Image (cartoon, helix red, strand yellow):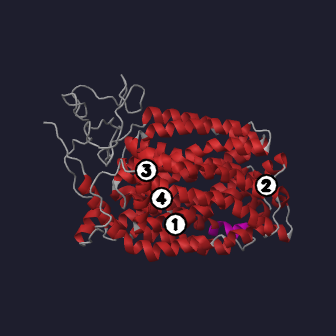
Amino acid sequence: MTTTVGGPARLRVIALLAAVLGLNTADSATVGSIASELEPALHISNPEIGLLVAVTTGIGAIATLPVGVLADRVNRVRLLWISILVWSAGMIVNGLSVSFAMLLLSRLALGAVVATAGPATSSLTGDYFGRAERGRIWGYILSGELLGTGIGFLVSGNLASVATWRAGFIWLAAPGLVLAWAIRRHLPEPARGGQSRLVPGETRIRPVRELEGAAPGGGAEPPGEGDADAPREGDADAPREGDADAPREGADAPWEGADAQPEREPEPVVREVEREEIAPDERLVLHEDPTGRPLWWAVRHVLSIPTNRALIIASALGYYFLQGLQTFAVLFLRSRFGLGQSAASTILVVLGAGAIIGVLVAGQLGDRLIARGRISARPVIGGVALLVAVALFLPALLISSLVIAAPLFFVAAAGLGGSNSPLDAARLDIMHSRLWGRAEAVRTVLRTSLQAIAPLAFGYVSAAFGGRGASFAQTSSPRSTTALDRTFLIMLVPLVVAGVLLLVRARMTYPRDIATAAASERATEPTRRVSG
């Protein structure tokens, strides 16, 4: 894996960011995996199960915009590890809840990771990795999101089955605390704007200090005592006297890789846009650093970019379906195919491996096609992947044999997961680097809003078709067995809309928006100083 991603330093960054996304999805999957135990224990039904997930994502949606502002202005690494500590405490309280009302209220704290993970992870990824490989890198990072889902289903589901539903929540606090420590200790805050890019072969992550005033209005904070990016005595990452990356002589000298680097050549996708003489949209080109601009201005600007609007809507609709699937997949497998709790959780993890394969393959495919001159490859791959998922989910939901349905579900999951890595890379391509946090926050607000609605919508629609809580999961009556089948079939419509939007709209506007973002970066680039 170290060789595949390009060295131990890059692997460390990818693994930590992937784990952050994995925590959030592990929680959502846990609620779905222990639904059969929660329903009789707390005397609740499918709509209440949906509400448990909805309240977390809803709070995350509300908090995301202010967190997005912070992600563009303060130390993003610190934001992450503090939010993860809050999340871990929330998981413990979840497991100690004695009523549905207490459980519901205790889940409010879990919105901290929902709000922070998207903006901070997106911004950090853009600063650590270049455009040419972001599809592949996002594939690795999003694999953590999918692995978190699998772990939530498998571990939490089996713990609930052999012990109690409380264990399904409480055990997740332990990896959360470990991750908070690892991020604080091993993930330095990079310089903004791409000066801290990790090239293949890096053996360690260099601590970075920006020149005072080199990043007007914000940037990475200087490392302080106890910060992850502060060198420690004896630390393998600490610069030594005589090292090439040691601070140069002078109080304000930067670290190697900071703003003192000479201007770099345009990245491949930008060169391709320039070669085809695609003009930027002058109305959207920024001529001053946007770091200090107010939130309302940032929201208006990121929503004025045509491709971004299409990507936000398509991504939100994809996550809407995925959230409903995560919440009710175990109940569906148990009712449809007569499986037990452990068997359903295990099979779901196996099927989820298809999503991991999809996210890895689609990200790399987009990078390769762009390198060959197919500028719009990323939105096209995302759209095709969603439509393939619909085409395979449709027959799989109508088949009563697990042996026949499982391969279809596997490939459909690959399509659903495969849409995410090229779209996440595309969003960074079309946005000024000092708006990455707020741009991701705007996207996350819509995405998490739909994710909050999804469990409730799936739960109420299934109830309308005859699904009734725990009894629904354990009966084989025709009415109950088809309740979630019909619900999932209806909810495929948003995926069709998302796929068509990417292929018809985003494919056409993407090249020009890349040119606009590149022009904005050049127009707002701070004056560089290079020490002699």
What numbered label is drawn on residue 360? Answer: 4
Q: How far across and how far down the image is residue 422, in percent?
A: 44, 62
Q: Amino acid at mark 1?
A: Ile
In the rendered image, which residue does mark 3 sit on?
437
What numbered label is drawn on residue 6? Answer: none
Judged by its main secondary structure, the magenta piece is helix
Q: Amino acid at mark 3?
A: Gly
Give the crowd class for mark 4: few <14, some 14-19, many >=20 residues within 10 Å.
many
Q: Quadrant of residue 287?
A: bottom left
N-terminal of the two: label 4 or label 2? Answer: 2
N-terminal of the two: label 3 or label 2? Answer: 2
How far apart marks 1 and 2 lie (CA) works out to 37 Å
Tag 4 and tag 3, C-beta contact below 8 Å: no
Tag 4 and tag 2, C-beta contact below 8 Å: no
Q: How far across and how far down the image is residue 432, in percent?
A: 34, 56
What element does badge 3 sit on?
A: helix
The answer to whether one can see residue 175 in this image is no
How far apart marks 4 and 3 lie (CA) works out to 24 Å
What stretch of residues is rendered in magenta?
A: 401-408
Q: Nearer the viewer, mark 3 or mark 2?
A: 3
What numbered label is drawn on residue 340? Answer: 2
N-terminal of the two: label 3 or label 1? Answer: 1
